[in-house]
Image (cartoon, grey):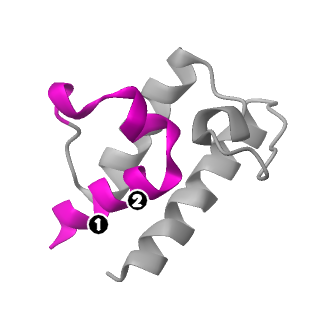
Amino acid sequence: MQHKEVQQEIRQIAKEFATSSGRTVNENSTNFLEAYGFTSLDALEFLLLLEEHFGVTFEDEDLTEETLTSEERLVDYVAERLV
């Protein structure tokens, strides 16, 4: 799967999760979690959705603020594990 496809799928999953939870989506935010209005609990649920969808595992030591708040780093993390 290409990097761009991973990015599009992550965005779609985030948007669907956010709207189903009644969150307002602000795609202009530079903070990925804030863009979708995710609380810390929402973020964990979202990661579980990504693990299930892509068949990847987020290791505890990789769950850093940098990975979770940057769309690019999150996409990179998932894409690297799909290779």
Q: Which residue is mark 2?
A: 75
Q: Residue at x 40, y 36 (%)?
A: 66
Whether residue 35 sits left or right of residue 69 in the image: it is right
Disc marking residue 79: 1
Q: Position of residue 64 (x, y in %)?
A: 32, 28
- The quadrant of the picture occupied by the C terminus is bottom left
Pick whichever, 40 or 69, lies toward us: 69
The three-letter amino acid code for the residue at tag 1 is: Ala
Instruction: Say which element carries label 2.
Output: helix
Residue 61 screen position, x and y as percent: 16, 27
Query: Is 8 rendered above or below residue 70?
Result: below
Contact (Cβ within 8 Å) of mark 2 with mark 1: yes
> 28 or 19, which is in the foreground?
28
Residue 35 lies in the magenta-colored region: no
Give the magenta-colored segment's residue range: 59-83
> Which secondary structure type mostly characterizes the magenta part of the structure?
helix
Q: Amino acid at mark 2?
A: Val
Q: How far across and down, in percent of the image, does residue 25 sit?
A: 80, 43
Q: Give the quarter of the image for residue 81.
A: bottom left
